[in-house]
Image: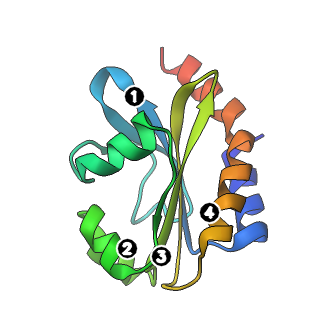
Amino acid sequence: MSLSTVEERVRDAIGVRLFTVLAWVPERRALRRVHSSHPAEYPVGGEKTVEVAAGWLDKCVTAQEPYFGRDRAAVREIFADHELIEGLGCGSIINVPVIADGRTLGVLNILDAEGAYDDDAVVVAESLTPLAVSALLDLEKENR
């Protein structure tokens, strides 16, 4: 399944204003953007290393747990690009790790207006992550 299709499924299930997919590159401890609903602001190929708080990386990538930023304050606390995020009308974020065989392949970043998501939306987002596994595995093979 393509990452565009994953975006459509997320949009249908819980709504999304900004959707990106980051592939985990463990040898560089970096996240490379491989899909973006807003390529002008968040181009494919961009990488994140220190732009996010270390605790976020430990939670999402290492511990393989979702991160739910309920409001703009939570987004500001974690993401250095919070002004751009807010400029796109986003103030709530769900980050869910994409996992295969116990290994983190990447992260789905799902953003919408402040108050758009709740704990139930996080559960739904987690349930959609398997849809991205094949696309991320394919990209991993291409980049070896």
Q: Distance between the Cα atoms at labels 4 and 2?
A: 19 Å
Label 4: state its secondary structure: helix
Front position among marks 4 and 2: 4
Tell me, yes or no, if residue 46 can be seen here: no
- Residue 25: mark in rendering: 1
Q: Secondary structure at mark 1?
A: strand
State the residue in front, 124 or 132: 124
* Tag 2 residue: 85
Mark 4: which amino acid?
A: Val
Q: CA distance from mark 1 to mark 4?
A: 24 Å
Establish if 100 lies above or below 10.
above
The residue under label 4 is: 122
User: Where's residue 1, x and y in %?
Assistant: 78, 40
| Amino acid type indicated by mark 2 | Ile
Q: Position of residue 105 (x, y in %)?
A: 54, 31
- Residue 142 vs residue 29: left or right? right
Circle 2 Cα neighbour tier, 10 Å, few/some/many (<14 / 14–19 / ≥20): many
Q: Please identify, in this view, whether the residue under mark 3 or under mark 1 is nearer the observer.
A: 3
Residue occupied by mark 3: 92
- Do the numbered discs 3 and 4 sit on residues whose CB atoms are within 8 Å? no
Placement of 42 over or under 88, stated as above or below: above
- Dot 3 or dot 4: first in sequence order is 3
Q: CA distance from mark 2 to mark 1?
A: 23 Å
Q: Residues within 10 Å of mark 1 (few under 14, many from 20)?
A: some
Q: Are the residues tagged 1 and 4 within 8 Å (C-beta)? A: no
Looking at the rendered image, the disc whose residue lies closer to the viewer, 2 or 3, is: 3
Disc 2 is placed on an element classified as helix
Depth check, front residue: 35 or 67: 67
Query: Mark 4: few, some, or many residues within 10 Å (few <14, many ≥20)?
Result: some
